[in-house]
Image (cartoon, helix red, strand yellow):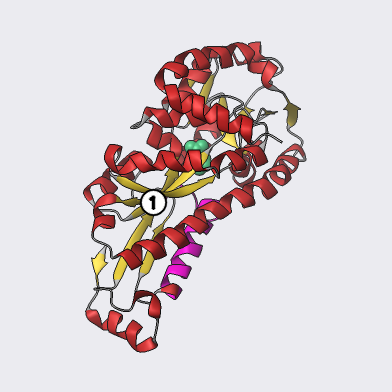
């Protein structure tokens, strides 16, 4: 955050913008993401930036840095802890590397479908989990969003779970997903999103764990023979503000940021519920060998995952399973 001169604040008062009249200073925030410029999370960040500028009468601005320009998610979290980065939209996966209870979101087949995943994320129980983040991770959790459910694309044919055995599969770098693929007999290869396309194209990995949006937008089908529509895991996002930066904000600014950033990240849920089936159909239309499988395909791996994570995520896993039951239609 940089503090601009009081001229901007004066301009706001002059413009009659009641929202921040009386606040001490105008601020230029920086918001980081891993996702490419055309991705839903980046669009949500851009929309928040526009709305904050408007609501503050031009006093506040947000510069959005997509595509890992400020580092990978672990690095962005570190920057937020020190107050060197103001805000980010990141995967809950990265949070789970520091606060293992968040691994409960990745219970295989917790959500029946994409709409159910959205309902799970919009409950008071999931929202309450964010309350611990200032203490455990040094960030303030503003709200959840999501990407689509996870799928598997393979460079070669994948007809049964046995075909997965021994294959190198790209994963997002976090433990719950690693444990799932280890249980399947695969060799998980952690890799941040921006590196995945090349790794698939040059054969560094045999398969990729990914959501439909990226598979479609980045045309993974150019380098993959098989798409398994598995829907095996949710993939929540979280909008964060550095706790250090938060501590220096006025109540009015906190309220404005909570409302606008919260609405922007929440809007991704509706976007994915609407778009995920469209992208899946688009991928199927590329001519790739496309097979939809259900939870039975992974039954043993799911049981092995549960055995590990019922210990590690304990009460939170129990809570999320209860939330999933209560939001099932
Ligand atoms: C991934 O690591 O697969 C990922 C990260 C952010 C958004 C979407 C996908």
Indicate whether 37 appears above or below 102: below
Horizontal arrangement in the rendering, residue 77 relative to residue 230 (left or right): left
Q: Position of residue 212 (x, y in %)?
A: 63, 40
Q: Position of residue 59 (x, y in %)?
A: 34, 76
Q: Position of residue 45 (x, y in %)?
A: 47, 58
For the record, the magenta segment spans 32-54
Horizontal arrangement in the rendering, residue 121 relative to residue 77 (left or right): right
Residue 38 on the magenta span = yes
Image quarter of residue 246: bottom left
Residue at 57% of width from left, 26% of height from top?
A: 207
Q: Could you tell me what secondary structure mostly forms the magenta stretch?
A: helix
From the image, which quarter does the C terminus lie in? Answer: top right
Image quarter of residue 251: bottom left
Horizontal arrangement in the rendering, residue 134 relative to residue 275 (left or right): left
Residue at 68% of width from left, 17% of height from top?
A: 297
**Residue pointed to by mark 1:** 88
Q: Nearer the viewer, residue 254 or 174?
A: 254
Indicate whether 88 appears above or below 302: below
Q: SS for tag 1?
A: strand
Outermost residue on the bottom side: it is 14
Residue 232 seen in the figure: yes
Image quarter of residue 21: bottom left
Q: Position of residue 119 (x, y in %)?
A: 61, 42
Indicate whether 4 appears above or below 96: below
Residue at 77% of width from left, 36% of height from top?
A: 287
Indicate whether 13 appears above or below 44: below
Residue 16 on the magenta span = no
For the image, the number of numbered tags is: 1
Q: Is mark 1 within 8 Å of ligand 1?
A: no
From the image, which quarter does the N terminus lie in? Answer: bottom left
Residue at 24% of width from left, 52% of height from top?
A: 244
Residue 192 seen in the figure: no
């Amino acid at each position: 955050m940089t503090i601009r001169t009081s001229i901007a604040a004066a301009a706001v008062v002059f413009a009659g913008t009641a929202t921040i009249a009386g606040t001490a200073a105008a601020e230029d925030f920086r918001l980081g993401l891993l996702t490419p410029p055309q991705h839903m999370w980046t669009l949500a960040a851009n929309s928040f930036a526009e709305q904050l500028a408007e609501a503050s009468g031009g006093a506040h601005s947000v510069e959005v840095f997509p595509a890992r320009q400020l580092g990978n998610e672990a690095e962005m979290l570190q920057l937020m802890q020190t107050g060197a980065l103001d805000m980010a939209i990141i995967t809950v996966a990265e949070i789970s590397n520091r606060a293992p209870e968040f691994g409960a979101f990745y219970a295989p087949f917790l959500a029946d479908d994409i709409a159910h995943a959205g309902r799970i994320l919009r409950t008071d129980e999931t929202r309450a989990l964010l309350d611990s983040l200032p203490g455990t991770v040094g960030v303030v959790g503003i709200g959840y969003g999501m990407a689509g459910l996870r799928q598997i694309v393979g460079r070669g044919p994948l007809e049964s779970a046995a075909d997965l055995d021994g294959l190198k599969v790209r994963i997002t770098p976090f433990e719950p997903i690693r444990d799932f693929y280890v249980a399947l007999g695969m060799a998980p290869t952690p890799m941040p999103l921006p590196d995945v396309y090349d790794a698939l194209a040059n054969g560094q990995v045999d398969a990729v764990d990914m959501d439909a949006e990226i598979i479609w937008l980045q045309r993974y089908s150019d380098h993959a023979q098989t798409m398994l529509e598995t829907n095996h895991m949710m993939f929540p996002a979280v909008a964060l503000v550095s706790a250090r930066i938060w501590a220096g904000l006025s109540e009015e600014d906190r309220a404005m940021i909570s409302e606008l950033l919260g609405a922007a990240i929440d809007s991704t849920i509706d976007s994915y519920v609407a778009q995920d089936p469209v992208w899946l159909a688009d991928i199927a239309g590329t001519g790739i060998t496309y097979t939809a499988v259900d939870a039975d395909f992974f039954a043993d791996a799911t049981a092995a995952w549960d055995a590990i994570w019922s210990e590690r995520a304990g009460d939170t896993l129990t809570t999320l399973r209860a939330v999933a039951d209560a939001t099932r239609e």
